[in-house]
Amino acid sequence: QVQLVESGGGLVQAGGSLRLSCVASARTISTYTMGWFRQAPGKEREFVAGISWTGGSTWYADSVKGRFTISRDNAKNTVYLQMNTLRPEDTAVYYCAASARTRGNVRAQYQYDYWGQGTQVTVSS
């Protein structure tokens, strides 16, 4: 089992920045593909960013490309999401997820085996 705990959410003005962290416990995530997803009120959960277990490959949703950066520190069992130039439409609960699969669609929720509880990000205009 992998337990994931997100932190770093909060209220920020449009144009501001936040850095989300996802700490894994109970098991190392060094061999897991990691992803960030988000769910806005009244909408389905959607892919935001993903990173391979080495950190050598990253993937982003078009809506966040160039503004968000995913990274990981396997020694700390932690994944980060640096969010810059935030917009009101980025308001959502952000979830961290871990996938033990080495192949497949990193953007698909069914790829992921473990999920955190989420952290709220609110961007005011």
Image: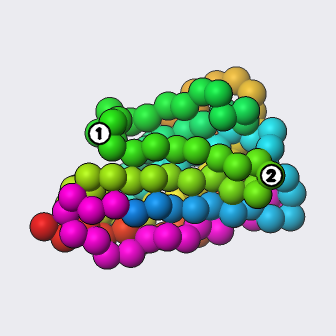
Depicted 99 relative to depicted 85: above or below: above
Are circles 1 and 2 on residues that touch, CB within 8 Å? no
As shown in the figure, which amino acid type bears the numbered disc 1?
Ser
Mark sitting on residue 63: 1
Of 118 and 74, nearer the camera is 74
Q: Which residue is drawn at 26% across and 52% down?
A: 85
Of 30 and 113, nearer the camera is 30
Q: Which of the 4 image quarters holds residue 87?
A: bottom left
Q: In this view, does 53 lie to the left or right of 28?
A: left
Of 20 and 36, nearer the camera is 20
Most distant residue in the top direction: 103
As shown in the figure, which amino acid type bears the numbered disc 2?
Ala
Q: In this view, does 44 lie to the left or right of 27?
A: left
Q: Is residue 113 visible?
A: no
What kind of element bears circle 2?
A: helix
Residue for badge 2: 75
Q: Residue at x 81, y 39 (%)?
A: 31
Of 89 and 77, nearer the camera is 77
| Pointer 1 local density, CA inside 10 Å: few below 14, some 14–19, many at least 20 | few
Magenta-drawn stretch contains 16: yes
Q: From the image, which quarter does the C terminus lie in?
A: bottom left
- Magenta residues, start to end: 1-17
Counting the numbered discs, the total is 2
Q: Earlier in the sequence, mark 1 or mark 2?
A: 1
| Pointer 2 local density, CA inside 10 Å: few below 14, some 14–19, many at least 20 | few
Q: Which residue is drawn at 68% across and 38% down?
A: 33
Residue 30 percent location from the top left of the image = 80, 44
Q: Which colour style is shown? A: rainbow
Q: Which of the 4 image quarters holds residue 5?
A: bottom right
Q: Residue at x 64, y 27 (%)?
A: 56
Q: From the image, which quarter does the N terminus lie in?
A: bottom right
Residue 53 percent location from the top left of the image = 72, 36
